[in-house]
Image: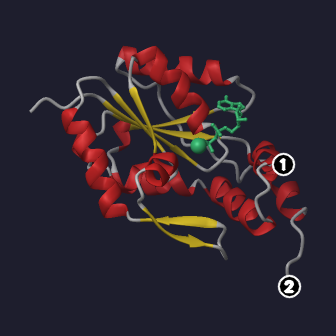
Amino acid sequence: MTIPPVYIVTGTPGTGKTTVSTILSEKLGARHIELSKFSIENGYVIEDDVERDTKVVDMDALESAVRDIIEKSVSPIIIDGHYAHEFIEEPLISFLFVLRKRPWDLKSVLEARQYSSEKVWENLESEIMGVITGEALELVPSSKVIEVDTSGQSPQETASQIHCMIESGAAPGNPIIDWVAHPETLRLLLSRPCTL
Ligand SMILES: Nc1ncnc2c1ncn2[C@@H]1O[C@H](COP(=O)(O)OP(=O)(O)O)[C@@H](O)[C@H]1O
Ligand SMILES: [Mg+2]
């Protein structure tokens, strides 16, 4: 069985995964699977977690459907979702891109989505701490994990940057992004409303 190249595009919500994956899929002639949309369309959402303002997905069913698509596809596949790194078997992954965005820029993107304040801050903290990169590095060898800072870039620039890495088959030396050391992060955290 020949497996097509599989590219994971993960990252905190609002970092640009879907926008970049859409452009990248045109450049690569790839099939783009946006996991949240795909789960809703195929009935894999099992619960609406109102408290956390999120949907609970049947991961086993989703995993098996995505694996089926990968096994049958002749064209490359882009899997886009903030949990995309968690369930694709590592040997199937060609590269895993973690999109990052300055937390102080991400805030307005999340607020524009009308997320609750809790959900905005949950995601900002996750981005500040680099939670998704940490999870990805536990599951996938570091040679396949590439962080991409989208801050100050257009979606086209980010998609071209990723396209170049894929075409050349090599990632540049990839220091892990650290937002914690930035004074803007401290300022952002100090602006957090008290919820007590
Ligand atoms: N360099 C960039 N790459 C991708 N999206 C960007 C970039 N800069 C700004 N954006 C904007 O960020 C917003 C969130 O993008 P989206 O693709 O919906 O994120 P996600 O799928 O990660 O939740 C969009 O309005 C998009 O146009
Ligand atoms: Mg998206």
Could you tell me which secondary element the residue under label 2 belongs to? loop
Could you tell me which secondary element the residue under label 1 belongs to? helix
Find residue 26 and report its horizontal and vertical position in percent: 48, 18
Q: Quadrant of the C terminus?
A: bottom right
- Check the image and report above or below for 152 versus 111: above
Residue 184 got which mark?
1
The residue singled out by tag 2 in the image is 196
For residue 115, side relative to residue 70 (left or right): right
**What is the three-letter code of the residue carrying label 2?**
Leu
Q: How many marks?
A: 2
- Residue 116 visible at all: yes
Find residue 12 and report its horizontal and vertical position in percent: 60, 50
Q: Residue at x 39, y 56 (%)?
A: 86
Q: Residue at x 43, y 49 (%)?
A: 84
Q: Residue at x 62, y 41 (%)?
A: 100
- Residue 162 visible at all: no
